[in-house]
Image (spheres, helix red, strand yellow):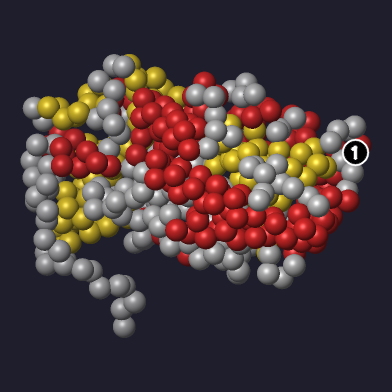
Amino acid sequence: MSIAPEREHIAPDNLKAVDLLKVAPSSMQITGGKVTIGGVDLLDIARDYGTALFVYDEQHIRRQLREYVRQFASCYPQSHIVYAAKAFCSVAMDHIVAEEGCLVDVASGGELAFAKAASFPMDRVLSQGNNKTPREIAECVDAGVRCFVVDTHEELERISAYALENGKVQPVVLRICPGIEADTHAYIQTANEDSKFGFNIRNGAAEEATKLALSLEGVELVGYHCHIGSQIFELKSYVEAIGTMFAYMNYIRTEYGFVAKNLDLGGGLGIAYTIYDSPSTIAQLAQAIAGAVHDNCAHYDYPYPDLYVEPGRSIVANAGITLYTVGSVKENPGICTYVAVDGGMTDNIRTALYGSKYEAFVVNRADEPRSIICDVVGKHCESGDVIVKNRSLQKCKPGDIICVLGTGAYCNEMASNYNKQVRPGIVMVSNGEVREIVRRETYEDLLRREVL
Ligand code: LLP
């Protein structure tokens, strides 16, 4: 008996590359069959830097950061935009975030090391993670990060002890699990009752944590945090979460006299991976969040807190693409065509993990219609090694260059060395110039950790 899911038979959409611009980096242009990003020909980039390769549009990233800053500032002046580094963490990216005046959220000692390497101002760093190690806690306290987002009692006690030993008082917010089922893939829902993240309100854990934080020396409780999930399309989940947070904050104020100075609402705004996706805009997110915070402050007569939001995906996902070279094209008549490329689940695990959908086109055939249905597959030893599943593409040949759109978030970050594959290089393009920001991995890099 086969356990493989039935393949849905669909017709090719006959679209050309120009029809996919909705999900492409904003500077992508297609004229006379030539495809450019930031004014540079993608075929030249593939030739000069090799494939597989991540290419980022710097202006697109800056535009997204500025849009967050502008929209939130206009609806709620006391707001802070915190880029969630886990979406795409590199020293060059940290430089951009710093230059745009935003904060950064680091989810590990490694991400902190990158922020340090970029000379990121440490008072603009938030420390996240549901199980920070004692070493990571020490590194963050020593670095002087602005605030910890705390997930457990053990962590509260560890931060308090370390800060006290070092003569410091570390500001913290508590991550609360408001019990919301956000409308997204189960793996990236983070605020339902059955979650490893945060302190649960309903079972009393949040109240206990608040009491503990208020009683401990070495930490200063400055507010609360919640993050309901990722790739969220329905803004009403945020409104619901804000209502739950304020009801809780009001209860705590009544019982303990504690008023939250900060409210951090996490990240999560969804993006368009396919041309049929219609996520909310940053402006709509800002209005929904600011509106709900205003309403709740009025309802409970609660002082306006400083608002933090932590976008990751919506800053970088559509700014990035992946370029691959086709190695072989295998036709399986009546079933599917497999276009095999020089990368795979090692540089994009999202299709295998979440069943994600991507738009792709053949760069050197951009003006041809996408007339076949195929799987763009990788070079690894698994049938699940698929980058683009059962979607339209131009008919192509070995040597052609494929562009997969919308791969700027959680692709490079979740990359692996399975089959001892070297991870791709990364270039950033802006105003007609390409700069390599992360060089392609080498066999020497892979061998460096071997004890010979
Ligand atoms: N803040 C916190 C506490 C988070 O855990 C996350 C993402 C963010 C902010 C940023 O969320 P965003 O704006 O990027 O949705 N690997 C998955 C996504 C996991 C998200 C984890 N947390 C994926 O590839 O879809």
Residue 8 visible within the image: yes
Q: Which percent across, then down, holds residue 187?
A: 49, 61
- Quadrant position of the N terminus in the picture: bottom left
Is residue 12 shown left or right of residue 423? left
Q: Which percent across, then down, holds residue 288?
A: 45, 49
Residue 229 visible within the image: no
Q: Nearer the viewer, residue 129 or 361?
A: 129
- Quadrant position of the C terminus in the picture: top right
Question: Residue at 28% of width from left, 52% of height from top?
Answer: 277
Q: Which percent across, then down, holds residue 379?
A: 34, 49
Question: Residue at 17% of width from left, 61% of height from top?
Answer: 336
Question: Residue at 41% of width from left, 22% of height from top?
Answer: 436
The residue where tag 1 is placed is 164
Is 288 rendered above or below residue 424?
Answer: below
Is 267 rendered above or below residue 118?
Answer: below
Q: Nearer the viewer, residue 209 or 405?
A: 209
Is residue 445 shown left or right of residue 362? right
Is residue 411 shown left or right of residue 156? left
Q: Amino acid at mark 1?
A: Leu
Is residue 289 shown left or right of residue 156? left
Q: Which percent across, then down, holds residue 135?
A: 77, 41
Question: Residue at 70% of width from left, 33% of height from top?
Answer: 146
